Amino acid sequence: MIKLYDGGVFLVDGKTIVEDNANADNELMALKGRTVSKQEGSENTMAYGILNKHNTSGSMDKLKIKFDAMASHDITYVGIIQTARASGLEKFPMPYVLTNCHNSLCAVGGTINEDDHLFGLSCAKKYGGIYVPAHQAVIHQYMREMMSGVGKMILGSDSHTRYGALGTMAVGEGGPELVKQLLNKTYDIDRPQVIAVYLTGKPEAGVGPQDVALAIIGAVFENGYVKNKVMEFVGDGIDNLSVDYRNGVDVMTTETTCLSSVWKTDSKVKEWYDIHGRSGDFKEQNPGDIAYYDGLVYVDLSTVKPMIAMPFHPSNIYTIDDLNANLMDILDEVEKSGAKQLDNDTIKFSLKEKVRNGRLVVEQGVIAGCAGGTYENICDAADIMRGSSIGDGEFALSVYPSSQPVFLSLVENGRIADVMMAGATVLSAFCGPCFGAGDVPANNCLSIRHSTRNFPNREGSKITSGQIASVALMDARSIAATAINKGVITPATDLDVNYTKPKYFFNGEVYKNRCYDGYGKADSSVELRFGPNITDWPAMSALTDDIILKVVSVIKDPVTTTDELIPSGETSSYRSNPLKLAEFALSRKDPAYVGRAKEVQLAEKARLDGKDPVAAYGELKEINDAIKAEFADFDINKTGIGSTIYAVKPGDGSAREQAASCQKVLGGWANIAKEYATKRYRSNLINWGMLPFIFEDEIPFENGDYLFVPGIRKAIEDKNSEIPAYIVKGGKLVPFTLKMGDITDDERKIILAGCLINYYAE
């Protein structure tokens, strides 16, 4: 089904694969009458051309990217704009879209969600932005419809910022990276490697984009094959996919941990732009005649079967046929791995009890968001469900079209009526089911969803409150097949369905009549609308010469997601209030973390107020004495005192900056990890002035231990890759060495300043 090449490859004329081995030159000569170097071939990728066009550094090895447009939703734009305001924002220098698709229900915390929305609208007017009111569109569907363009680059404060199927390289990052763009700064990265994804063949009827995406994720996630790289989609199989189908595969590339994605474009993409009234944003885009890739993922679409990603990760994949054939064995594996991931003795995670008459029965289905709620997904689901019923039992199905124009077309062609008549509930555009703020199932229930993630708590349960539910990811077609089978897991390929494929008609008047487009029309006289939950960032101090860190949490799971660092769901309502939100940090992974961090922070607050930190936090006396015994010049009153967490591989998943900023607000100075799951999480740490330490071996310290890092400021200034440190324990200092990966000069300055806000203030 999927093959990963061991090394680099040359791709000739977009279709012939030549492996980079001793015979490569001979093969290239036979095919093209010439050879090219790997360097020259790498410059023939689509990704290279787009990056080169947007790079301002003059060096293609060290990129400084300026984006064409940006996007944020209503649980990120408040913090971003507040940070930018504190750093000197005058107006938005590019089209910046503020959507309202995450807190659009306005159901938690009183008035605070709608306060954020009014703040966003006032910012769009004051600074010249584009404002998309609640229920009009999920962020990525709007950006596809209105802002994408072949060869463009878009930056979004949401990890699923992916518009590669439309020829656009899009990147999901933490908020501070958007702040840099708002202040006319750049996105600084080393040139990423590019991995070809070669699609061939044609999917079987009933196999949808989620099936293809999950198959790819399962092949590349755990081995890191595409981590922080660009996935470039090529091959003759693309011709057999509609643009909606391509979008559905593309948005899920985030779950591979790649940096971005881009696809070749063709007449179908041209038609898509024509339909959306933006013909000028299309051009044909292909790799050069001999392009070099750092690896290749070969996908035979004809062999992909309906897939299911079992809890608790999109890479935990099985074919539905295999699941049904080996049900009890697979469920036993899932229960064991899930219990280990949850790491909660008070919760019983059980799926085998859902087996009835030898089949797995689920209680809920959801088709929603940027991945599931697209036009063709819902049309195909309607064709499956037409004339049938989901029944009057426990099983329920919710369908959320991804935008009002999509909803309108589905109403006009009758597909919404088909879905509703079958018993499904149809709602407006909303991202909630993707992050745990909508369609929360009952305790111990399993929800099947065509959405983006199935991490713990993504369905809204609260494990620390004794509640457990879980999500399995499936394609809309198999969800519909399961729905008419009353919740019995069923692949769509088991059904004989006439897929009608009605033509899509985009009506842009929906947006013209409701959305505010203020780009280029900034009005500095507009007063911003604040609410009681919108607060400024607290003051943050610069990095001191030395630092003392107390380890306040040790997480030894193979991967730690951003959901575990700062939960999604109901906490999203407090993301405009840094202090309030910080109370939820690690709450579902290590509930004692916040209290421990706050205790250490007492000492730092005292120090900054000119008081004795030892008196403020008595534990420090022994630490102070031990350090002074070996470092005679040590002065605790001039030493930063804070906390750190250790995690094996933190940061998988969401781009949300709050996974880092909440630690900073609570006095965090650093993270220590074997590696960081994503570039964006590591960038978030740096932008909030936190040290992204690496320690690759088994850690020599424990939770509650103190670490002393002398000369840390000078080490950062001198660009040292190895940082001497000490464990302070039992009155002694035990040496060990921390590492610091590559960071740019600007990132060093940000760390030294204490955070991005301080850096710009300087």
Image (cartoon, grey):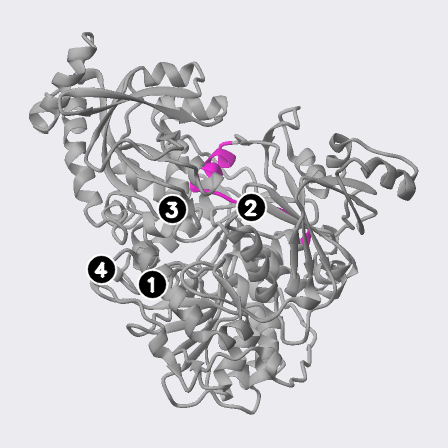
* 577 left or right of 488 in image: left
In the picture, the disc for residue 106 is 1
Looking at the rendered image, the quarter that the N terminus falls into is: bottom right
Mark 4 neighbour density, 10 Å: few (under 14) some (14–19) many (20 or more): few
Residue 750, horizontal then vertical, whole percent: 41, 25
Q: Earlier in the sequence, mark 3 or mark 4?
A: 3
Instruction: State how far apart marks 3 and 4 are (Cα).
Output: 37 Å
Q: Earlier in the sequence, mark 1 or mark 4?
A: 1
Residue 331, horizontal then vertical, whole percent: 41, 70
- Residue at 47% x, 37% y is 177
- Say which amino acid is labelled 4: Asp
Circle 3 sits on which residue?
A: 78
At mark 2, the secondary structure is loop
Residue 226 seen = yes
Instruction: State how far apart marks 1 and 3 are (Cα).
Output: 15 Å
Circle 4 sits on which residue?
A: 345
At mark 3, the secondary structure is helix
Q: Earlier in the sequence, mark 3 or mark 2?
A: 3
Q: Is residue 255 above or below residue 735?
A: below
- Depth-wise, is mark 1 or mark 4 nearer the camera? 4
- Depth-wise, is mark 3 or mark 4 nearer the camera? 4
